[in-house]
Image (tube, rainbow, N blue to C red):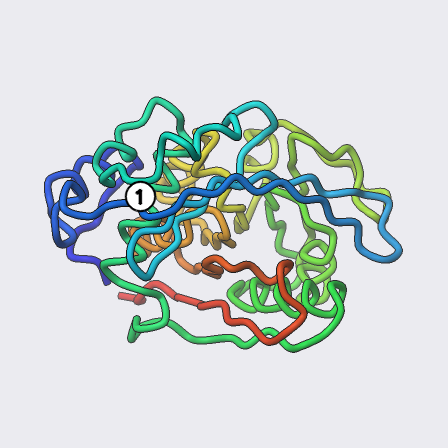
Amino acid sequence: MFPAQPQSIPELQEAVLEGAFGPLPSELAVTSAFYVHHTTRLAGSQVTYRNQYALLRSGDAFGACSFEPGDVAPDFCAEASGHTLDTLIRHESAPVRIAALDAYLGRVRPHRDAEDAETVTLPTGTPEARAGARDAAVAGLLDIAPGAKVALIGVVNPLVAAIRERGGVPLPCDFNLRTTNWGDPVTDDMAEVLAEADAVVATGMTLMNGSFDRILEHCRKHGIPLVVYAQTGSAVARAFLGAGVTGLSAEPFPFSQFSADETALYRYRAERI
């Protein structure tokens, strides 16, 4: 576990800047910055996923944050390399702040060395096979009764299928999709699905768009399990285990979609009292 239990992203940011998690971020520099834009359309899908990532490397860690088109300009890379992490944790851009926090927290406590992490090896194979294995690993963190309603905030179709296979009823919510592969309506109203949910599965992108703290507060208030699947901010989300987050599938860069070979993700479960 981390040495502190923040209750919100701003609290975590302040604690990191004060050195509560290890060395001061002002002592750690960013070596490389990346702007990555890619698209994915899995076989049989009607959906093309369009992803943009800001990536920051500091030491042996990469910090990552996915963002919406226009949120970060490609030339941010020219300004980011060489800065210390404290500067970027205070950056005006939310995706850059999250990527910098992720780089810091992933550097001071790498997922690969975490004693409370379960390593899941995604197999060599096609994009469809690897996505299915990844989303089954996420769904495996859910401990739900048959018929439980699961708010899925950030929709990927294999995860919809994985929730159904475990007896759950997915309540999909996404800003960019209107239906799932099976014709299920997708709402863009997060409050609507949270109000019905017996459990929540949320993408790490909620760290960037400001909705993570609202989800966290709702799940704490109502005692609802919250599982986060994170390429964005995988080490950031980990800081909230036991403070609202009950399960985490952390996938640090390089992500599964960038390789056909075996890669690892790391599953965490909050300690039960």
Query: Looking at the image, which residue is at 80% across and 38% down?
Result: 179
Quadrant where the C terminus is found in the figure: bottom left
Q: Quadrant of residue 61?
A: bottom left
Q: Which residue is mark 1?
A: 101
Q: Quadrant of residue 259?
A: bottom right
Estimate the x, y position of residue 118 in percent, counting from the top left.
42, 75
Q: Is residue 195 above or below residue 225?
A: above
Q: Measured along the vertical axis of the image, is residue 224 above or below residue 108?
A: above
Dot 1 amino acid type:
Leu
- For the residue pair 32 and 166, the one nearer the viewer reads as 32
Is 238 drawn above or below residue 211 in the view shown? Answer: below
Asked whether, in this view, residue 218 is left or right of residue 273, the answer is right
- Disc 1 crowd rating (10 Å Cα; few below 14, some 14-19, many 20+) is many
Q: Residue at x 44, y 68 (%)?
A: 266
Total marks in image: 1
Q: Position of residue 101 (x, y in %)?
A: 31, 43
Decide which of 235, 32 is in the foreground and name it: 32
- Pick the front one: 273 or 46: 46
**Quadrant where the image shows the N terminus:** bottom left
Residue 12 on image: x %, y %: 24, 40
Point 74% across, 52% down: residue: 157
| Position of 131 relative to 93 (above/below) | below
Looking at the picture, tell me which residue is in the foreground, 113 or 166: 113
Q: Residue at x 67, y 69 (%)?
A: 260
